[in-house]
């Protein structure tokens, strides 16, 4: 049983590695375990870790930072389109939420009206997805730059006056709704940079309906999460960030993804940490947010700098 467990652990190595079929590694592990079940389990875990590390190294040997930019651009383009679809869907809601009544001495805008901003945002978001999927680089880059301008106009000129369209993400403009106000400007900039850096590779036409379906699903989930919008995206972003940061030294593609995700999370994290003292702050989140975000930026930069120097 012990020998079978160690032999199974060796299967974690790539197919062309001698360690996958060699009995010498199993015999060495058996000697190190010395018949102890706990030592045997530890040796098996070590073999699996070493095998997965070699498998990742073999898989990522031919990848580059540009490949990471392509992954980053694809993920952010789908999320960007989901936000646009979410805003458009508000116009066909059976019971639209009306913000047009006076509140606190001023009128809040009605986000359920699809005006030129939502239309332009949706067109730009769709242009990015189509440009990336069909390898039409000029379309993708121009649409990404237009997307930055549209989001920046809303975040910098409209949001400070309480008329930002991203208020539609939350019916009451809650501070923990994501993205809200300036929160999505950083991801839009990261999306534009990643789109410009991504290599132009034609993909299957199947990617277009898959991207549209994924964006529509995210928009539906945001509607179900009414009041907090796309806040649920922060959890998968955090789960993606941990392995991307820790394995970035082996794979430049993961380092690029980790850097882009970390930069995009700066606005909501800063907004959370700078809330008024009377607002609710989770001690765990407060202690982990700033150091985790700093590591998410510094470590990928160190990985990429080390790879460039070597």
Image (tube, helix red, strand yellow):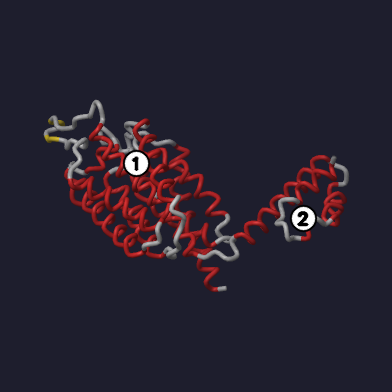
**Quadrant position of the N terminus in the picture:** top right
**Residue 195 appears left or right of 166:** right
**Quadrant position of the C terminus in the picture:** bottom right
Mark seen at residue 178: 1
Q: Residue at x 78, y 48 (%)?
A: 43
**Residue 151 appears left or right of 290:** left
Q: Residue at x 26, y 40 (%)?
A: 88
Image location of residue 290, percent across then percent down:
43, 49
| Residue occupying the far top of the picture | 95
The residue that disc 2 covers is 20
Distance from label 2 to label 1 (Cα)?
A: 46 Å
| Residue occupying the far front of the picture | 205
Image location of residue 235, percent across then percent down:
46, 41
Q: Residue at x 24, y 26 (%)?
A: 95
Q: Is residue 106 above or below residue 43?
A: above
From the image, state whether disc 2 or disc 1 is nearer to you. 2
Q: Nearer the viewer, residue 294 or 170?
A: 170
Q: Residue at x 79, y 41 (%)?
A: 38
Characterize the local packing of mark 1: few (<14), some (14-19) or many (20 or more) Cα atoms within 10 angstroms: many
Q: Please tell me whether mark 2 sits on a helix, a strand or a loop.
A: helix
Q: How many marks?
A: 2
Q: Nearer the viewer, residue 29 or 9?
A: 9
């Amino acid at each position: 049983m012990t020998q079978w467990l160690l032999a199974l652990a060796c299967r974690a190595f790539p197919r062309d590695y001698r360690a996958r079929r060699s009995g010498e590694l199993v015999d060495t592990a058996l000697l190190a375990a010395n018949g102890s079940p706990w030592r045997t389990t530890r040796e098996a875990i070590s073999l699996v870790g070493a095998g997965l590390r070699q498998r990742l190294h073999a898989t990522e040997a031919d990848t580059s930072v540009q490949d990471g930019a392509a992954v980053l651009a694809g993920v952010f383009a789908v999320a960007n389109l989901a936000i646009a679809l979410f805003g458009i869907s508000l116009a066909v809601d059976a019971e639209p939420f009306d913000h047009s009544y006076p509140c606190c001495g001023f009128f809040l805008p009605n986000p359920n009206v699809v005006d030129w901003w939502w239309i332009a945002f949706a067109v730009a978001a769709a242009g990015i997805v189509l440009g990336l999927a069909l390898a039409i680089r000029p379309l993708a880059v121009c649409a990404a730059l237009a997307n930055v301008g549209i989001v920046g106009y809303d975040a910098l000129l409209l949001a400070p006056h309480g008329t930002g369209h991203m208020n539609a993400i939350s019916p009451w403009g809650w501070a923990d709704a994501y993205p809200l106000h300036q929160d999505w400007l950083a991801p839009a900039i990261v999306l534009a940079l990643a789109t410009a850096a991504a290599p132009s590779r034609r993909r299957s036409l199947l990617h277009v309906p898959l991207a549209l379906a994924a964006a529509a699903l995210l928009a539906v989930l945001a509607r179900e999460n009414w009041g907090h919008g796309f806040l649920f995206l922060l959890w998968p972003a955090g789960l993606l960030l941990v392995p991307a940061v820790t394995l970035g030294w082996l794979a430049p593609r993961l380092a690029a993804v980790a850097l882009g995700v970390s930069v995009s999370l700066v606005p909501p994290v800063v907004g959370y940490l700078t809330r008024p003292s009377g607002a609710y702050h989770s001690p765990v989140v407060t202690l982990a947010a700033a150091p985790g975000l700093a590591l998410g930026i510094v470590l990928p930069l160190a990985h990429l700098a080390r790879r460039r120097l070597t």
